[in-house]
Image (cartoon, coloured by chain):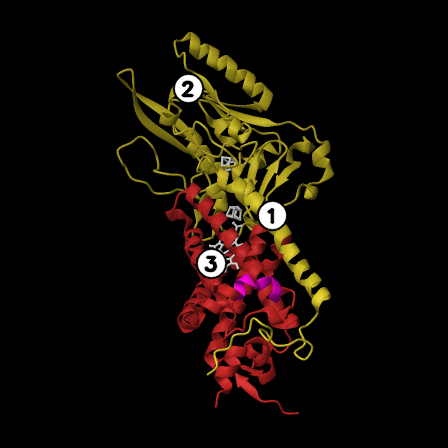
Chain colours: A red, B yellow
Amino acid sequence: MAERLLTRFTFFERILHWVVGVTFVLLLATGLAFAYPALFWLTALLGGGPSARALHPWVGMLFTAGMGAMLAVWFRDMFLSGTDRRWLRAIRHYATRDTAKVPPAGKYNAGQKMFFWVQGALAVVFVVSGAALWFPAAFGAAFLQWMRLAHYLATLGGGLFLIVHVYLGTVAYPGTARAMIDGTVTERWARHHHPRWHEEQTRP
Amino acid sequence: MTDTLSIRRVSASPDAYIPISALRSGGPTYAKLVDIGACIGCKGCEVACKEWNDLGVEPTANFGSYQSHRDLSPKTWLLMRFNEVEVDGNLNWLIKKDACLHCEEPGCLFACPAPGAIVQYTNGIVDFNQENCIGCQYCVTGCPFDIPRFDAATRKVSKCNMCVDRVEVGLEPACVKTCPTNAISWGSKRDMLALADQKVETLNARGYENAAVYNPAGVGGTHMMYVVPHGDRLGDYSLPSDPTASPAPMTALGFMKRMGAYLMGFGVLGTLVHFLRYGPERLEEHGGHGDGPAREVPSA
Ligand code: HEM
Ligand code: SF4
Ligand code: SF4
């Protein structure tokens, strides 16, 4: 049964997503290694302690570039509409699979849009505080200590969002991950998860 | 003697990593006492430090002070700071022997993320182990006395190690050995505190009524202490009056890291529980999102 496929992400969008995704996971792993002694062994991902410390900010630059491009490419699709506000109020039904009570989403649902904006804002926190920690000689000790706190809180926020993002994108919603692999989804998937987008795409 | 290098604390390592022998050890706890009133500013200690630790010469220039260098560096672990201050109409040198104070509660060690890069021995010495250092310079921000110095070429930090290799074999640090006026004393922390009190009394008798011991409580006391004739002008000696090993942002960071570990743990667990409860969303079992009354598709 050959099902009709809809194109969800262009090649360029997929590249951007994985640049941000891979760099984010590397930064998360090495960052957590710096934050938690029990995880220090994760620095091995970037060649051990000293080289992980030297490379983390450079990977951060790549992450920032990817994130910047992503913001530029997607921001127009990500503004919240009235339906999105109703979606957010119904988020409980979304989480409990009471799908009939969830307002129909367009290309992105309100949860995805929030994820986008929150990660965008966190990226700013990461770059600003990370840049200070990168060149500590230029700043005072107290300021750097606050920057460590900010950098960590951003990590915590980003890490929590990442857990949910990966869970929803893989095991929770089968058929979703392929959107970021070959760029397509099935029509049934689209009708189910993003009915208004499906309608736009299939309108004759 | 064998106990002098028992380990008390190791950076970025849970207490459990510390060998049991350290807990048993009642070995000596040393301290260095610097009597600033007895210092004649000869800088012999600076030279002794350079020699013993093989730090090499750093060219310097006259910048209008008797001070040898402007600042500490990875190659200058000890600097006599010649603070020129007017006291009661007279010019005074309020000299500071600027080097690691070997804090009982070392802010540098608490700030360090690399296991084993900073070690505190039960004898009180705080030492950097460059082999394990990742070069992040967090210790620099953690030290309330601005002591560790980063070498951009090797990407490691260094500072005074209290001549740990001499102390280990029963010798005093090189600066103590060399001081021609005995302004620097060496012994157990208890003896040095008693000696400090005596010195303060002597200074008081000579009319220095504000003479004081510098052994700040905010870092649990230090293993290099000063006797300062003008205890009311700590700032003029470049000595912080209220140093702390756990400033507010670091306390907050420690707390948030603990909370964060739980939150991330519960996050992973939460998705697992959610999956066990709801499983993968099958397109055929449920209607699509918004198939119920909430659905308002603009009829195009
Ligand atoms: C975007 C640009 C970024 C830059 C320039 C940057 C830079 C830095 C620097 C210089 C440090 C100090 C290194 C050390 O502890 O040895 C650091 C630490 C850290 N980074 Fe980043 N980083 C960036 C992004 C990220 C991201 C995206 C994450 C997490 C997903 C992250 C997580 C961490 C964590 C957890 C620490 C340790 C914080 C602490 O214990 O105080 N960083 N970062
Ligand atoms: S003076 Fe600074 S470097 Fe020395 S032990 Fe105290 S905190 Fe560490
Ligand atoms: S620079 Fe080295 S010693 Fe200092 S905090 Fe970082 S890893 Fe520890």
Residue for point 58% across, 55% down: A33
How far, Cα to Cα, is label 1 from label 3? 19 Å
Q: The N terminus of chain B is located in which quarter? A: top right
- Name the secondary structure under disc 1: helix
- The response on whether ligand 1 sits within 8 Å of label 3 is yes
- Label 2 Cα crowd, 10 Å radius (few <14 / some 14-19 / many 20+): some
Mark 2 and 3 residues: CB-CB less than 8 Å, in contact? Answer: no
Please tell me which residue lies in front, A63 or B298: B298
The reply, left or right, for residue A5 in relation to residue B65 is right
Please tell me which residue lies in front, B132 or A89: A89
Determine which residue is flagged by label 1. Answer: B259
Query: Residue lying furthest front in this view?
Result: B293
Mark 1 and 3 residues: CB-CB less than 8 Å, in contact? Answer: no
Query: Pointer 1 indicates a residue of which chain?
Result: B
- Name the secondary structure under disc 3: helix
Residue for point 54% across, 85% down: A6
Q: Image height check: is A183 above or below A104?
A: below
Magenta stretch in the rendered image: A87-94
Q: Image height check: is B36 above or below B254?
A: above
Q: Is the magenta stretch mostly helix, strand or loop?
A: helix
Task: Kindly identify the amino acid type of the residue bearing the numbered disc 2.
Answer: Gly
Q: How many labels does the image show?
A: 3
Asked if the stretch drawn in magenta spans residue A89, the answer is: yes
Determine which residue is flagged by label 3. Answer: A122
Determine which residue is flagged by label 2. Answer: B231
